Image (cartoon, grey):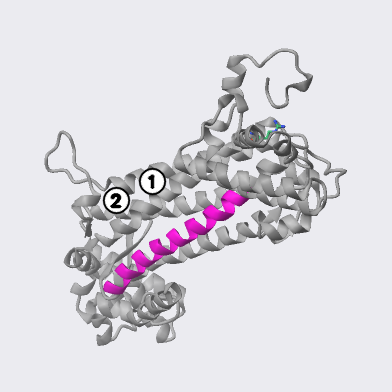
Amino acid sequence: MAMWGGRFSETTSQSVADFSESISYDQRLYKFDIQGSKAHAAMLGASGIIPEATSKAIIEELDKILERIEKGDFEFKQSLEDIHMNIESALIDKLGNEGARVHSARSRNDQVALDIRLYLRDEIKNIVELLKEFQKALVFQAEQNIDTIMPGFTHLQHAQVVSFAHHLLAYVEMFSRDIERLEDCAKRINVLVLGSGAIAGTTLPIDREMVCKLLNFERVSRNSMDAVADRDFAIELVNALAIFTMHCSRLSEDIILWCSQEFNFIELGDAFCTGSSLMPQKKNPDVAEITRGKTARVYGDLMALLTMCKGLPLTYNRDLQEDKEAIFDAIDTVKKILSVYPPMLGTLTPKKANMEKAANDPALMATDIAEELVKLGVPFRNAHHRVGSYVKYCKDNGKNLDECTLEEMQITIPEATAEFLTLFDPRKSVAKRNIVGATGFEQVAKQVKFWQDKLK
Ligand code: ARG
């Protein structure tokens, strides 16, 4: 008979047990379930709800159960449904009636909400650390490539010349916001929900502040119905992870393009690429591709959580058990990406000559000419038009922008001086963008230094 079997006269059908169990996946919460139960038992003892000696015995036995689980010496039973009842039942096996006191003033509804919060609080810390390693790998490459120049793209068309480091640091910025989002959502996760009972709290004189302190939460929840019903904190977290994978996916797309024969801007280490079973010449950037692919499943996890919650009347409904696989999958997927990406970036070798050659296209300096005109007092819109006409003149005459004489240039740009013909140097074009946030070498060097200091 199940632990809740008092009002039942038949046992659960096997197909229902198979269908409704969560122990096959929520067993990974064991550490947090035990941590929560220990704090709860300590409080029950201190508040006189159970004898002090019983509280002590429960806490000691919970430690033994933890040890057994870590040694692989604990049998998780499907008939006990979930991690909460597996551990409680093991406690009762050892302590009999003393163990049966642990669930006083508690429900699995507040217990599971507590466990997920403890688990996510822990994982956020791990992920933030890994994300910083990711940033470090990018900053390391940036440091080596401040004066590596390449065409920057808009619409996947050559736009203006940029420093390769500037491109890499763009992702460092994105990841720093991902970290902020994770840390921000940790604030809302860091609330003690235990003590909410199944829905309405308890008639027993529990000390929630004590449990809150023991478990290092920021504060206790104010509304028991909200506490057992909502999973917005998990949705927020998976949303932050989905945004992070979106950023990774874009970086992956850049890397995939750069590895292609058409771009030929970088080479990745052999250890981080795979070959084709058919075409002997192939070396594919599979890590980047799989990352781009895995982004889709994290979006799927986010959609699953949002959809799972949208039609639920307050408060707890068993649907909420389905939160775990989506949460775990998002976290596992992100951790997998984080374990492989930074070392892969360490093997990235830029093909500087190819990048520079692509950057050495005078058309990329068209904006510089327009801005030179602005310096001479020409309104930008007119300057833009004149340079546009010059580009057309060059195209019509089969010339590059730097292949005309000053007289030819003056046909469309009457203000042009001899100096204008020197504006087609891609390095100078980058160097001149010497304002905060721009790609000028001096600025990028400052940004590299900023991140190095921050990530120390
Ligand atoms: N395994 C359940 C879950 O993950 C625990 C809570 C079950 N509560 C209940 N009243 N059946 O949500």
> Could you tell me which secondary element the residue under label 2 belongs to?
helix
* Range covered by the magenta-colored residues: 116-144
In primary-sequence order, the first of circles 1 and 2 is 2
> Looking at this view, is 155 or 440 the one in front?
440
Instruction: Say if residue 299 shows up in the picture.
Output: no
Mostly what secondary structure, the magenta segment?
helix
- Of the four image quadrants, the one with ligand 1 is top right
User: In the rendered image, is residue 141 in sight?
Assistant: yes
Q: Is residue 287 left or right of residue 219?
A: left
Rounded to the nearest angstrom, the CA distance separating label 1 from label 2 is: 10 Å
Residue 123 image position (x, y, % from top left): 52, 53
In the image, taking residue 423 as reference, residue 60 lies left or right, namely: right
At horizontal 41% and vertical 85% (from top left) the residue drawn is: 375
Query: Residue tagged by mark 1?
Result: 292
- How busy is the neighbourhood of tag 2: few (under 14 within 10 Å), some, or many (20 plus)? some
**Which residue is label 2 attached to?**
256
- Asked whether disc 1 touches disc 2, contact meaning CB atoms under 8 Å apart, the reply is yes
